[in-house]
Image (tube, rainbow, N blue to C red):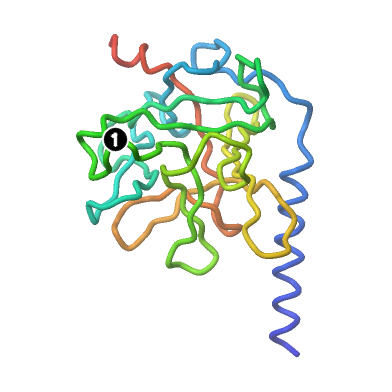
Amino acid sequence: MRTSAIIVTLSFSFACLLIGITAGADPEPVLDTSGQKVRRGVNYLIVPVSIIYPINGLTLINPSNTCPLYVVQEKSPFHGKPVTFIPLEDGKDEILTSTDLNIKSSVNPITTPCDESQSLVWSLIKGGVPGVWFVIAGGEVSEVTQTTIHVDKFGTEDYVLSFCADICPGCPITCNKLGLFEAEDGYKHLAQNYQLQPFGVRFVRAQLISSK
């Protein structure tokens, strides 16, 4: 009976968290660190909000030198790998908060263990840790729930990424904020789990970084 009560409590807490995530404000333009609107097809770096200069951004790696590639935070003070945003609504150029989109990494296939045919669209994969879903590069540009992402407001100037996925049989499709999960390989993986703290981010145009 005590175990059942704990499960009910956790389920209720998880449901409340998901309700809070899905009940967002009206969509508004997502802005980069220069105050410009984030747009389709432009290269951006996704960096943490807790630093002054954009370092320790997100990159792709697989410590076992195999595919798929995981989205992780740089260990060293590097900016990470650029990504592009793909709105799922036809004809949309600017990225709006709380709307369906795909994220695709931009990385030279020669520097990875994956061949040139490997997709770099972000997706979710169930990891070896119970309740943790890892973000990988390997999905397709579509409205399949395992690749659908929202950019949500996180405070007044910052953002958080939310994956919208059917993560269990019979569960409704919900959008859950992404956090960082420190795995046994020593990397902080971008991941989905209700116990993780949301990973607040900002978006920097990659051209601005390369010109400095």
Q: Position of residue 93 (x, y in %)?
A: 60, 14
Residue occupying the point 46% across, 37% down = 121
Q: Position of residue 175 (x, y in %)?
A: 67, 46
The kind of residue on which mark 1 rests is: Glu
Residue occupying the point 29% across, 59% down = 185
On screen, residue 145 above or below 169: above
Q: Which image quarter holds the N terminus?
A: bottom right
* Nearer to me, 206 or 107: 107
Q: Which residue is mark 1?
A: 116
* Numbered circles on residues, count: 1
* Nearer to me, 65 or 7: 65
* Nearer to me, 66 or 58: 66
Q: Taking 44 as reference, is 146 left or right?
A: right
Image quadrant where residue 73 sits:
top left
Residue occupying the point 44% across, 55% down = 181
Q: Which image quarter holds the C terminus?
A: top left
On screen, residue 25 above or below 18: above
On screen, residue 179 above or below 11: above
Q: Secondary structure at mark 1?
A: loop
Q: Residue furthest front?
A: 117
Disc 1 packing (10 Å; few <14; some 14–19; many ≥20): few
Q: Position of residue 18 (x, y in %)?
A: 72, 52
* Nearer to me, 50 or 211: 211
Q: Taking 3 as reference, is 191 left or right?
A: left
Q: Position of residue 128 (x, y in %)?
A: 42, 67
Q: Taking 31 as reference, is 114 left or right?
A: left
Residue occupying the point 69% across, 85% down = 3
